[in-house]
Image (cartoon, rainbow, N blue to C red):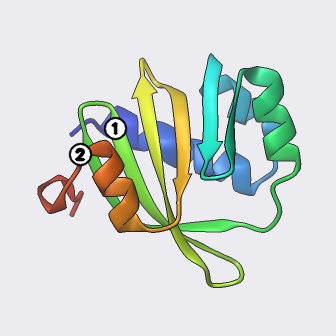
Amino acid sequence: MSTSEIATVLAWHDALNDRDIDTLVKLSSDDIEIADADGAAQGEAALREWAAGFTGTVTTGDMYVRDGSVVFEETSDDGIVRASAFRVVHDHVTSVFRHASLAEALAATGLCEEDLDA
């Protein structure tokens, strides 16, 4: 487990919740990939557009970490629980994929209960 990877993703979430798009960009790679079941986009311009359209806040729950992969269970303001899978390289988020459930995110990344950051 890397404290650096965890800190990067927590800071990324804080910037998103605070609508601090400049910090969000600084914490991301230039060619960041953002995706969910409906599609994907890549690069700083796509990140800025996606973040500008983000509403509400997300509270992070259980966290799973291994070898640069970080999965967080997330609860939105409206009570919907999802999960996001992040890839972190050299303290920058290189990709984030929003999943419908924690189980789906863990399956997609190969993480498991042994990777739970307790």
Q: Position of residue 20 (x, y in %)?
A: 80, 42
Q: Is residue 3 above or below residue 107?
A: above
Q: Residue at x 56, y 53 (%)?
A: 98
Secondary structure beneath dot 2 equals loop
Q: Looking at the image, which residue sits at the far left? A: 114
Secondary structure beneath dot 1 equals strand
The type of residue carrying mark 1 is: Ser
Q: Residue at x 24, y 31 (%)?
A: 67
Q: Which of the 4 image quarters holds residue 58?
A: bottom right
Relative to 95, is 47 on the left or the right? right
Q: Residue at x 26, y 35 (%)?
A: 2
Q: Residues within 10 Å of mark 1 (few under 14, many from 20)?
A: many
- Badge 1 or badge 2: first in the primary sequence: 1
Q: Residue at x 71, y 83 (%)?
A: 78
In the picture, the quarter occupied by the N terminus is: top left
The type of residue carrying mark 2 is: Gly
Q: Position of residue 57 (x, y in %)?
A: 71, 66
Q: Looking at the image, which residue sits at the far bottom? A: 79
Relative to 31, is 9 on the left or the right? left
Q: Residues within 10 Å of mark 2 (few under 14, many from 20)?
A: few
Q: Which of the 4 image quarters holds residue 11?
A: top right
Q: Position of residue 33 (x, y in %)?
A: 61, 29
Separation (CA) of disc 1 from disc 2: 9 Å
* Label drawn at residue 110: 2
Q: Is residue 48 above or below residue 82?
A: above
Report if the CB atoms under discs 1 and 2 are less than 8 Å apart: yes
Residue under circle 1?
69
In the picture, the quarter occupied by the C terminus is: bottom left
Would residue 74 be seen by someone viewing this image from the given angle? yes
Front position among marks 1 and 2:
2
Relative to 55, is 1 on the left or the right? left
